[in-house]
Image (spheres, grey):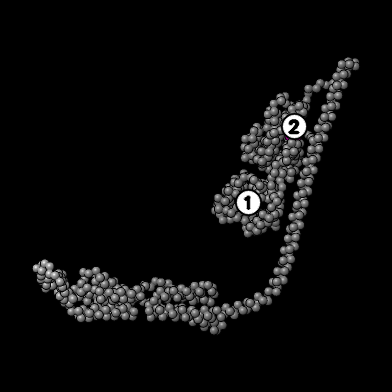
Amino acid sequence: MPASLPLAGRRILVTRPEAQAGDLCDAITTAGGDPLRFPLLDIVAAPDAMLVNGAAATHAAQGALVIFVSPNAVHHGLPYFLPWPAAARAAAVGAGTAQALTNAGIPDVLLPAGHFDSEGLLALPELAAAAIAGREILMVRGNGGRELLEETLSARGATVIPLTAYHRTAPAPERLADLREILVFCPVDAITLSSSEMVASLATLFSGAQPRFPAWQEALGNGKHAVHSLDWEGFIRHILFDRPLFVTHPRIAETARVAGFTHVVQTATSDAGLVEGLCAYNWPPIMTDTSQPSPVQSSTSPPPFWRRARFWGLLALALLVGWQWWETQRRLASAHKALRQGYAESEKRTRDAEQRLARAVEATEALERKYSALAARQEEFQGEATALRQIYQDAAQTREDALIADMEQNLNFAAQQLQLAGNVRAAIIALSGLDERLARNDNPLFLPVRRALAKELEQLRATPFVDISGMSLRLENVITGIDTLPLTLSFNVASHQPQPVAKTTAVKNGWRQGLQEAWQEVKGMVRIQRFDRREPVLLRPDQALILRENLKLRLLNARLALFAHDQATFRGELKAAAQLLEQYFNTREKPVIAVREAIAALAATELNVEFPNLNDSLIAIQTLKSNREKR
């Protein structure tokens, strides 16, 4: 590898998932580096992704916005939306996700202008509250992750439907043990991370691990990163936390600093941005081992002491080489075991996919059979539908004739109520019911009739309402109470009859009883009454009866004039009745006052109200009947 390349001699640990690490490793190799691929996250398809995304495709076809949060979301979720609906629009959180959608042939991808994250996507005007209120948004993502997008879009009035298309799982414990061995025996110069979950996995890598200082320190001592202390925490910090950590987002950088990493470098979110950050980093110079002196030629043979030292040195070297070979074989066996497990898991996933595909094919065949049966039934029913259509047309013709006759009858009834009884309310009820029936019929032929009805209903509602029935009842109540009204003066024969004296067998206090009887006779001879008007007429009982009957006749005549809408007669009879009350009845008594007030209120009512006619509606119905007869 040429030493002029920016990453020459640098070993870079790539922790991205297996499916996404290829392009980054190729770019690091092109820059002269040595990529060491070890995924810290495994991406697998969600077990229920087919069911969930299959149902969501219906929403996408209705014009929903589909947000893909990562390239993994595109890889695992996009196939369930294909062929892509023309009414739907895709949105991506980052540039890599947008590129994956574009490569898949999805047009017009919505992408943040500056920051490629959830905040940048939410800042777009297409996702403002006014633009998405009441709209459905499908969010294709993995398990876990941030809830910022879903919570913010829901708060802005959108209906967010989260779709879990894949699951992110941490590596198995035995794979993490392999990574510990790699960091010890193959020290790396830098580590790349692309998610906060990877930071957590890496930070807890040595938690609970047992120290193996002799072997690990010997390995580090023979390498380019020497450790001269057996301090466990210092050892871990040297091989892990002091290494440069290259991340793609400020949130990941903050998580790494909190976890204890000291050299955190933030780069752009793409693979090119990561490689650019690696190349621009101020790397320390690569140290070469100059501690061994050059061999010196000697013409004399080495003394026996040196021969024995060389023998033991060669023996120690042989033992070291043997131990190194055994350790290498152990690690290779562990790697082969991990590969076998991964291959078994891959085969299991393949078999599961084949089974799901077989079930999908069976379901498709069943649907095709049902479709064929439905097509045959449709052909059978087509003739019956034609016959039913003809029957319906005949029935509709009959219903129209009945409806026209009913309209004409209702209009005649409303006109009679107006002209004969002046009953505006009954006419309004009849016309309103007729208009509701025409509205339910929804036939364009009845539009002229409905226009005439609407105009006449408006005129009737504007007509002053005269409560003939209520006024008649008030007059009837007044007539009923005439017999109980007190007169100004009346001759009561019963009050002048002598009271019978009780007979007793024994006379007690005779002189006192005689005085009481004399006083009663004097009181009956004298009557004192005050009058504030002209002298009233003293009526005999038979004359009082004739007076009351005459007053009743006046009120009955007023009632007849009320039904005939005769304003002059109605007011004249009420005025005569009021004069009789004033002349012969005691106007200070409450019953007389109440009758006078009732008569005055009735006399003030206006009966001569001009009612509108219903000629326009009748003419419209006659025109409709003539057109139907011509047709």
**Split into 4 quadrants, where in the image is the N terminus?**
top right
**Split into 4 quadrants, where in the image is the C terminus?**
bottom right
Q: Residue 328, labelled with which disc?
A: none
- Residue beneath disc 2: 184
Vertical order, 329 against 128 (above or below): above
Residues at circles 2 and 1 in contact by the CB criterion of under 8 Å:
no
Secondary element under disc 2, as helix, strand or loop, is helix
Q: Residue 162, labelled with which disc?
A: 1
The reply, left or right, for residue 425 in relation to residue 164 is left
Vertical order, 125 against 286 (above or below): below
Residue 385: image quadrant is bottom right
Residue 198: image quadrant is top right
Q: CA distance from mark 2 to mark 1?
A: 42 Å
Q: Is residue 523 visible?
A: no
* Label 2: few (<14), some (14–19) or many (≥20) C-alpha neighbours in 10 Å: many
Residue 178: image quadrant is top right
